[in-house]
Image: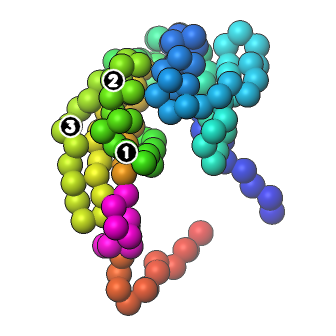
Amino acid sequence: MAMDLLVNVDVSDIGRAVTFYTQTFGLKVTRRLGAEAVELSGWPVRLYLLQKPEGSPGAGDSKRRYDRHWTPVHLDVVVDNVEAALSRAVAAGARAETDIRTASWGKIVVLADPFGHGICLIEFLGRGYDEIADPGGSALAADG
């Protein structure tokens, strides 16, 4: 069974979102899909920015909002230099929510894009996540 993964990010202003994601992460506009959707490339997965008005129907009974909101699904963007990436993100309209923290596997900073979506910038150090991997090499079984 062939599968693909697409990432869709709802935004209230498509022009501002394109500017943020292209300036911050160096993504390129691949194509425009009408006036309210843009496909960006440059990551291993295509990113679609979808203009949806604040207050429009979201999931279930929820209404879309673009102040800072929490969801367990967020973007982790691996960068070569977390300090430089954070500077670009803030200059393009992001809000840093933590200081840069260093762990055995690397550096991380949490921020919100201009539309309230959580993004973590990660710079791997040493062996990256292998620094904290189970040395026995056991993996969790996928129960599907």
Q: Is residue 39 above or below residue 4?
A: above
The kind of residue on which mark 1 rests is: Asn
Q: In this view of the protein, which residue sits in the foreground, 72 or 94?
A: 94
Queried whether the magenta region covers residue 22, the answer comes back as no
Residue drawn at x 63%, y 39% as measured from the top left:
42
Judged by depth in the image, the label closer to the viewer, 3 or 2, is 2
Residue occupying the point 21% across, 54% down: 102
Label 1 crowd bin: few (<14), some (14–19), many (20+), radius 10 Å: few
As displayed, is residue 71 above or below residue 104? Answer: above
Residue 21 shown left or right of residue 82 in the figure: right
Instruction: Write the residue at 66% across / 35% down.
Output: 41
Mark toward the start of the polypeptide (3 vs 2): 2
First reached walking from the N terminus: tag 1 or tag 3: 1
For image coordinates 36% across by 76% down, the residue present is 133
Where, quadrant-wise, is the N terminus in this rendering?
A: bottom right
In this figure, which residue is indicated by the disc labeled 3? 98
Q: Secondary structure at mark 1?
A: loop
N-terminal of the pair, mark 2 or mark 1, is 1
Find disc 2 in the rendering and name its residue: 90
Indicate the secondary structure of the residue bearing disc 2. helix
CA gap, disc 3 to disc 2? 12 Å
Above/below status of 37 relative to 111: above
Foreground pick, 10 / 47: 47
Residue 106 sits in quarter: bottom left
- Residue at image mark 1: 81
Residue 131 shown in magenta: yes
Start and end of the magenta stretch? 124-132
- The reply to whether residue 45 is visible in this rendering is yes
